[in-house]
């Protein structure tokens, strides 16, 4: 599947990138001021009467907080767009259809001849400004909100990110790579078709917490566990491992739990991560009500090459919310996720505060509260082993990372997450 195929969905129009400034647009009169959404004072529901452009934006995950950040750019005549993918030549964005003047829209009747619905979003290409920032995790990525100059087909600025998912790169010096920005829900898919791998789930959870987004565990293929008592037991097992994380058993095959999942992700932007074969593509298709992502019955066990089957990057869901499903996102590895690891193993961190030595490594130290909990059985051995493994792995990754960039990034994230937390909380909680 070629990358450009993403522009061919029935509701999108693919536009060639234009390098010639204001070509054919003549004076300001011939090129109407881009429609800029009204800035609401409260986050509007997707159905809010915010006008065509506003509606399209809210369907893409826009909210009052982003609108506030965007206000200065609106004054400059720029239009908000959400980055679908970044490539060598620039990026693809979704912008409100109403913001793209008809004369610059060569194909208003895409696949099937249906006109682009009013209030919908269209795909445009745009160039990206040079990013001199030495930190690679600051580069634009899928999910970023941008201020777009539609006349020049150029991105002028990115809005501050609320959350960001990072992964380690395979290079010797790990600098991290951005996978997705402004994600509210990280859905961790764990298959019920195989023996539960809690350690793996914990690794994905650490990454989710680290991003700033809220995790949600989905136990897939529930139809394969026919005994409801067994199923309940498995859900309880996982829930005990992940305090504070909702756990849902779903089956894309029978539809069980799918409405609950759709409701959980309806108020924001979600990503699906999990082991290859966990049923992510099947879930995406079920959530979309269409065959968009490729499901293959037989894959090579290491899953190499499967990314070529990913056909879409940023997908508005019919039930509300947006799904980001970019190549490389699904099997992510930990990267600099100390905070996330601590959050997954909150009870161990908590116990550690009662250790006699504040820098206790919980190995042989006298007065160690963690070892005491292990001895009296209140802390399962598996949990401690998993914690040690992830903490070690994380320390190793952190040691390969530029310390100054790392410290800067931490500070920035704290600021950004504090700013965006309120809106993210609303998105997460709004549909419960
Ligand atoms: N019984 C049953 N099988 C399912 C269900 N969902 C998915 N499967 C099967 O599980 C296999 C893997 O599903 P995929 O959706 O391709 O898994 P994936 O997580 O996207 O895999 P990667 O793309 O490799 O990451 C396929 O054979 C699906 O038919 C389900 O709800 N019930
Ligand atoms: Zn200790």
Image: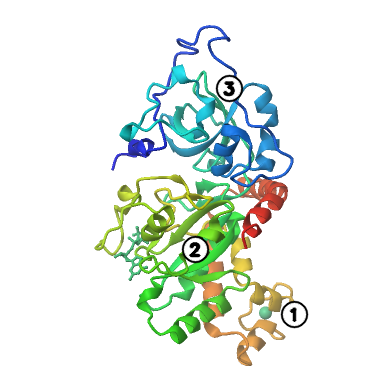
Residue at 48% x, 73% y is 199
Instruction: Point out the quarter of the image occupied by ligand 1.
Output: bottom left
Q: Nearer the viewer, residue 189 or 158?
A: 189
Q: Which mark is residue 259?
A: 2
For label 1, count other residues whose C-alpha is less than 10 Å away and answer few (under 14), some (14-19) or many (20+).
some
Residue plotted at (55% across, 7% down): 27
Question: Which label's residue is closer to the chain start, 1 or 3?
Answer: 3
Task: Report the Cα–Cα distance between label 2 and label 3.
Answer: 37 Å
Q: Nearer the viewer, mark 1 or mark 2?
A: 2
1 or 3: mark nearer the eye: 3
Q: Position of residue 287 (x, y in %)?
A: 44, 56
The numbered mark, 1 or 2, whose residue comes first in the sequence reads 2
The reply to whether the C-beta atoms of the residues labelled 1 and 3 are less than 8 Å apart is no
Q: Is residue 321 visible?
A: yes
Q: Residues within 10 Å of mark 3 (few under 14, many from 20)?
A: some
Mark 1 → mark 3, Cα distance in angstroms? 59 Å
Which-is-in-front pick, marks 2 and 3?
2
Q: Which residue is mark 3?
A: 34
User: Quarter of the image containing the N terminus?
Assistant: top left
């Amino acid at each position: 599947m070629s990358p450009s195929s993403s522009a061919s969905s029935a509701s999108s129009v693919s536009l060639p990138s234009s390098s010639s400034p204001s070509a054919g647009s003549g004076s300001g009169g011939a090129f109407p001021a881009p429609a800029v959404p009204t800035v609401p004072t409260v986050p509007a529901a997707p159905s809010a009467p915010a006008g065509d452009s506003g509606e399209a934006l809210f369907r893409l995950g826009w909210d009052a907080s982003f609108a506030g950040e965007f206000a200065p750019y609106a004054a400059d005549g720029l239009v908000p767009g959400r980055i679908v993918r970044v490539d060598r030549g620039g990026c693809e964005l979704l912008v409100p259809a109403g913001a793209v003047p008809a004369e610059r829209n060569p194909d208003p009747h895409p696949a099937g001849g249906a006109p682009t619905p009013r209030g919908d979003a269209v795909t445009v290409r745009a160039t990206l400004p040079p990013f001199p920032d030495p930190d690679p995790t600051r580069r634009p990525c899928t999910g970023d909100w941008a201020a777009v100059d539609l006349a020049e087909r150029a991105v002028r600025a990115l809005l501050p990110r609320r959350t960001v998912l990072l992964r380690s790169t395979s290079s010797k010096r790990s600098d991290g790579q951005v996978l997705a920005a402004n994600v509210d829900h990280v859905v961790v898919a764990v298959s019920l078709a195989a023996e539960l791998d809690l350690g793996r789930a914990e690794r994905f959870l650490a990454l989710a917490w680290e991003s700033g987004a809220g995790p949600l565990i989905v136990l897939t293929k529930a139809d394969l566990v026919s005994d409801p008592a067994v199923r309940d037991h498995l859900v309880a097992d996982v829930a005990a491992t992940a305090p504070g994380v909702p756990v849902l058993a779903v089956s894309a095959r029978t539809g069980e739990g799918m409405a609950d999942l759709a409701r959980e992700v309806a108020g924001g932007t979600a990503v699906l991560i999990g082991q290859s074969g966990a049923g992510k593509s099947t879930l995406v298709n079920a959530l979309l009500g269409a065959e968009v992502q490729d499901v293959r019955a037989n894959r090579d066990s290491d899953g190499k090459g499967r990314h070529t089957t990913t056909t879409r990057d940023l997908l508005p869901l019919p039930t509300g919310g947006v799904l980001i499903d970019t190549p490389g996102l699904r099997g992510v590895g930990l990267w600099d996720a100390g905070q996330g690891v601590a959050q997954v193993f909150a009870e161990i961190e908590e116990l550690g505060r009662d250790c006699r030595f504040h820098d206790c490594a919980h190995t042989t130290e006298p007065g160690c509260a963690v070892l005491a909990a292990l001895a009296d059985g209140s802390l399962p051995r598996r949990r401690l082993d998993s914690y040690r493994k992830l903490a070690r792995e994380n320390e190793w990754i952190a040691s390969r990372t530029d310390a100054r960039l790392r410290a800067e990034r931490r500070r920035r994230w704290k600021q950004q997450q504090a700013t965006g937390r309120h809106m993210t909380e609303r998105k997460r909680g709004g549909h419960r």
